[in-house]
Image: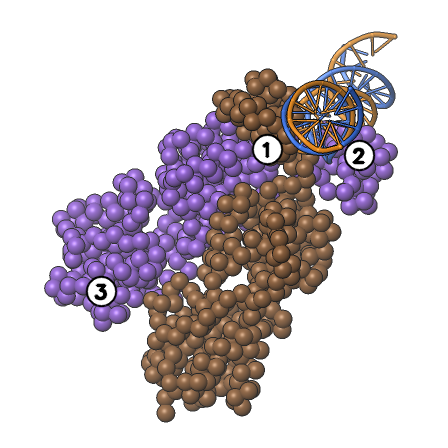
Chain colours: A purple, B brown, C blue, D orange
Amino acid sequence: MPAIGDVARLAGVSKATASRALSGRGYVAEDTRRRVQAAAARIGYIASPDAASLVTGRTKNVGVVIPFVNRWFFGEVLEGIERALLSAGYDLTLYNLAQAGPERDRVFDFFLARKRVDAVMAVGVDLTEREVEVITRRAKPILALGGTAPGAPRLAIDDRAAASLATEHLLKLGHTRIAHLAGAGSGAAARSVQGLRRSGFLESMDAAGLAPAGNSGGVVEAEMSLPGGYAAALQLLGHPGDRPTAIFAASDEVAFGAMRAAERLGIAMPSQLSIVGIDGHEYAELFGLTTVEQYPGEQGRIAVARVMRLLGEVSDDGAPEHDDTPLKTRLVVRSSTTSAPR
Amino acid sequence: MPAIGDVARLAGVSKATASRALSGRGYVAEDTRRRVQAAAARIGYIASPDAASLVTGRTKNVGVVIPFVNRWFFGEVLEGIERALLSAGYDLTLYNLAQAGPERDRVFDFFLARKRVDAVMAVGVDLTEREVEVITRRAKPILALGGTAPGAPRLAIDDRAAASLATEHLLKLGHTRIAHLAGAGSGAAARSVQGLRRSGFLESMDAAGLAPAGNSGGVVEAEMSLPGGYAAALQLLGHPGDRPTAIFAASDEVAFGAMRAAERLGIAMPSQLSIVGIDGHEYAELFGLTTVEQYPGEQGRIAVARVMRLLGEVSDDGAPEHDDTPLKTRLVVRSSTTSAPR
DNA sequence: GTGCAATGTGGAACCGTTTCCCTATGTCAT
DNA sequence: ATGACATAGGGAAACGGTTCCACATTGCAC
């Protein structure tokens, strides 16, 4: 494998000059630069990033911690991040970690804290204070996209507002018997995404002077997946007596599961049951699902841009350092919701 | 940041001994080893992988090239690979690359060929000879999981056999008017996954003395996704006249799309239309889809084990160097298929 | 007692870059 | 003429590990 010394010799310059010529830093005569570049190309020289990292301390690599890759939202975010990172010349090291615990501690202590990454992005993860601290103590930026992150910059939609938007859509249609399929799991904590969506729902109901309706008190916890929504909806809709006329599902995948359950139970949609979700899932249009769209791919790109700023990769002339504007959402009405039956 | 020299000084030994004590290579008195480890722990020493890579030439990192992360199969594989790699102490660098082209060339030349990864895994990618050569020339293992890879070790199910299995299931049920929703895209080449499934179908039909049935010659190309299957199925089932009684879909997601299309067209399932897919998708059970299961998560783990062998990480005592046994598949019959209507 | 292998440790070279510091030249304002 | 400054390039010292080689000690077979 040719090293920079070989290039230098071939071009008749010193290693120092060769390095400057190839990296574009410092003064090099245009003529010399061309000679060096030609030499490098001729012998197929490829710089060793390890050697460079060793001295510069920067790796051109960011670590992404994500609990799932196979849920639509997370997959989209990941794709968005990957693309943006790649075009910024960065590599992406993936850590697929679900629950906090010894496994995650190991990753933070032995992988992320090592000098392999310049920054950490946590997607939909509820970070502990210790985790944030492990990274920041190493003077590395850490950015959360969704989830929670005590003491770290965070990018997210306004989950509470999104839930209210969905709920108020149902209220405007005249529904009074509305249930919520809430996200279960570690994220059941109040400040988590699932918790915020739940409180948005409850607030809007409260403001309308209504209580959640249906079996199990009108709020049933569902794993944030299609089968999770299916199971929860079966439970919610099981008793024909006090059946709600509308459901606000914590995610589109949960909503799809609920639609499937309604179909199985022979409940006509949307005439007997309206359903609204959150996400803007790829399949929402095909299944006619009314939803509060968010744009995970774009969120990934925005998050990367923010990290690049934190890394000083872009001149942040005048860009507000602390931009806490929530990410974009939009209600899209389709055929899964209609006026309340009378 | 403490370096190994600091540890050595604190433990009263040389850098050489400290290195040996921490890595476990070479002779170190048990007593000394403990002293060094205690010193390292005390000052929170973390070894720099870059420095180590520089001299050893190994990075403990493998690159994974994958065209999608948001299709079920690929997401599962990725999760399986990630888990296995992590527990082998390796990092995973993700390259989400769809079509061959300049973008992919750039990644192979400027990222993968660089010394950042010890090996490359290509999942469901049709690699060019040049791409394989770029990696192998650097004396790095490259392993394909699915897709095609001229001159590289490859792990895959027997796609042709899986397609035959699905088709023969329909034939045994007495269907004679059978159509195929074939995978479209770059993978339409004969040796690709989609191509192999198509020929498996055609062979079985041929062996039964039947021709594909339905609109558009009984074989319609579909993008390998739910909306893709939906669109293709609408086209296939559009003309009530020569409608097939059964469909073999190239993947479960395509099958789901077809089911949705049938529903939209008011075609009763399975009485008027049977559908079988390939994959063993997470949702198959819920939707009652008959399918030829494969096990992508496990495939990922197997692929990692293979790569570890190629990297000499495990003693491959007696293990067959060239194991070309296809990966496991299994037909699972559910409610989406039934006897042909008469 | 000698020879040899196994064990234990340190010094120093090395991996492949970047960057600091120093020197040299040309240009331009004073 | 004299600085000041921008441009250009070289030598050498990092960066933080691993490993080669040399040397010392010990145990054991002969």
Q: Gap between marks 2 and 3, in whole Å?
A: 73 Å
Question: Can you tell which of label 2 and label 1 is closer to the viewer?
Answer: 1
Which of the 4 quarters of the picture holds residue A196? top left
Instruction: Say above or below: B181 vs A287.
Output: below
In the rendering, at what x and y percent does residue B262 appear?
Answer: 38, 77
Name the residue located 50 percent from the left edge and 66 percent from the top edge. B328
Question: Can you tell which of label 2 and label 3 is closer to the viewer?
Answer: 2
Q: Look at the numbered disc 3 and give the secondary structure of its residue.
A: loop
Label 3 chain ID? A
Amino acid at pointer 3: Leu
Q: Look at the numbered disc 2 and give the secondary structure of its residue.
A: helix
Q: Do labels 3 and 1 share a chain?
A: no
Which of the 4 quarters of the picture holds residue A263? bottom left
A69 on left or right of C18: left
**Which dot marks residue A5?**
2
The residue identified by callout 1 is B23
Residue B254: tell me if it is visible: no
